[in-house]
Image (cartoon, helix red, strand yellow):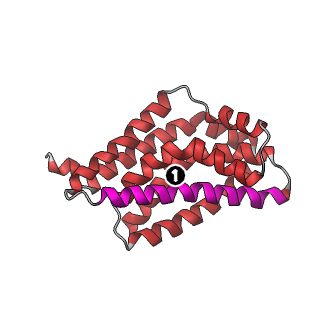
Amino acid sequence: MTALIGSTVLAFISTNIDYLLILIIIFAKYKNKHDDKLIFIGELLGSGTLIVVSLVVAFWLKMIPEEWILGFLGIIPIVMGIKMYFGDEDEGNEVREKLGKPQRSIILSVIMITIATCGPDNLAIYVPFFTTLNAGDIPIVLGLFFIFLCMITWLSKMITNLPKIQVFFERFGDLITLLVYVFLGIYILLESGTIQHFI
């Protein structure tokens, strides 16, 4: 159980360090207190969509008979982390551009931003992670994800009013993301027995 909780925390953190910055930008844009609930609903629907897609893909991948083959999926987060760290992409600017365009509703805007900016990262982490789980683990993981999502929403709202902390995440967020992605990738390779298979 401890290992499951630890790996769940890692999977969530690795996909949500950047998302924390995105939420800060969103909360800074929509400062009306009534909008907070709409942002959370959009965030929940956007993240939920990515999680469901990841679960479906992971379910089909688990039909592969040799579990150690699935471990190669652990290479994806490692590569993604390195690519994101050394790449020139700035998700913050992308989000600002999308928020600047007229949208039909706040909920729809947040759903679109969540899927567009977090989709590749979340799928790259969640699909390999979900392939390491058994059926009994999934409700626990989904429950923890919901709790963490509530926490990151609250945290991003608080950080919106704390410029120094926002600067810290802008400066070191990419490095933290890289380290967590690499660690999670290695965990998946070990948990699936891929590394052990070649030793």
At label 1, which amino acid type do we have?
Answer: Ile
Q: Does any portion of residue 154 appear in the rendered image?
A: no
Residue under the point 52% across and 69% down? 143
Per the image, label 1 sits on a secondary structure element best described as helix
Residue under the point 30% across and 59% down? 62
Query: Residue furthest toward the front?
Result: 104
- Residue 19 is situated, as x and y percent measured from the top left of the image, at 60, 46
Q: Which of these two is toward me, 171 or 63?
A: 63
Say left or right for 112 vs 182. right
Query: Residue furthest toward the right?
Result: 32
Q: Which residues are magenta?
A: 34-62
- Residue 42 is situated, as x and y percent measured from the top left of the image, at 68, 56
Residue 62's place in the image compared with 110, above or below, is below
Tell me which secondary structure the magenta stretch mostly adopts: helix
- Residue 184 is situated, as x and y percent measured from the top left of the image, at 39, 49
Q: Quadrant of the N terminus?
A: bottom left
The residue labelled by disc 1 is: 13
Few, some or many C-alpha atoms within 10 Å of disc 1 (few <14, some 14-19, many ≥20)? Answer: some
Indicate yes or no whether the magenta region holds residue 21: no
In terms of image quadrants, where is residue 153?
A: bottom right
Residue under the point 15% across and 50% down? 197
Q: Does any portion of residue 81 appear in the rendered image?
A: yes
Say left or right for 116 vs 123. right
Residue under the point 32% across and 52% down? 188
Q: How many marks?
A: 1
Q: Which of these two is toward me, 151 or 116?
A: 116
Residue 18's place in the image compared with 149, above or below, is above
Residue 137's place in the image compared with 118, above or below, is below
